[in-house]
Amino acid sequence: MKKQVPVCEEFRVHRGAVAKVRKMLGDDALFARLAEFYKALGDPTRAKILYALSISELCVCDIAGIIGMSDSVVSHQLRILRNMRLVKFRKEGRSAFYSLDDEHVEILLRQGMEHATER
């Protein structure tokens, strides 16, 4: 049996609520960036990479070994994550070590993992 979604029985716009929320929504570009962030997490490989980097700073070879993919696949995913400002890197000799760009990314990852594991 299909669950019915509750809907209004009469169409009536609550102007005060609509005006308040519209004002809070602000710039569409902000929501585009927010959607891009969650789009990045929507790919299991990128989500694994981000989660691994929330535990430790790692080089491409380390990440490839952890997630069981080639270094070229990992490099491609890291490039996407770097362009989205979710990860950063530092060079040490001939190695590039990656980490999360800031604490906000880690907080959102942890909260997402908590939500995903709760019953």
Image (cartoon, rainbow, N blue to C red):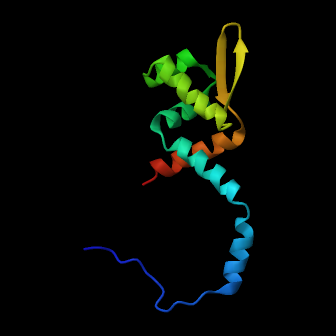
Q: Is residue 67 above or below residue 13?
A: above
Query: What residue occupies the far bottom of the structure in this picture?
Result: 10
Say which residue appears at 67% left-offset and 79% top-offset.
18
Residue at x 72% of width, y 20% of height = 90
Q: Is residue 82 above or below residue 41?
A: above
Percent across and percent down for residue 31 are 65, 56
Relative to the observer, which residue lies in front, 34 or 29? 29
Q: Residue furthest left?
A: 1
Give left or right: position of 76 versus 23.
Answer: left
Q: Quadrant of residue 101?
A: top right
Return the residue nearer the eye: 72 or 69: 72
The relative height of residue 68 versus residue 117 in the rendered view (above or below) is above
Percent coordinates x, y for residue 96 in the rendering: 66, 16
Task: Report the label total.
Answer: 0
Residue drawn at x 29%, y 73% is: 2
On the image, the x and y values in percent for residue 56 come to 62, 25
19 lies left or right of 7? right
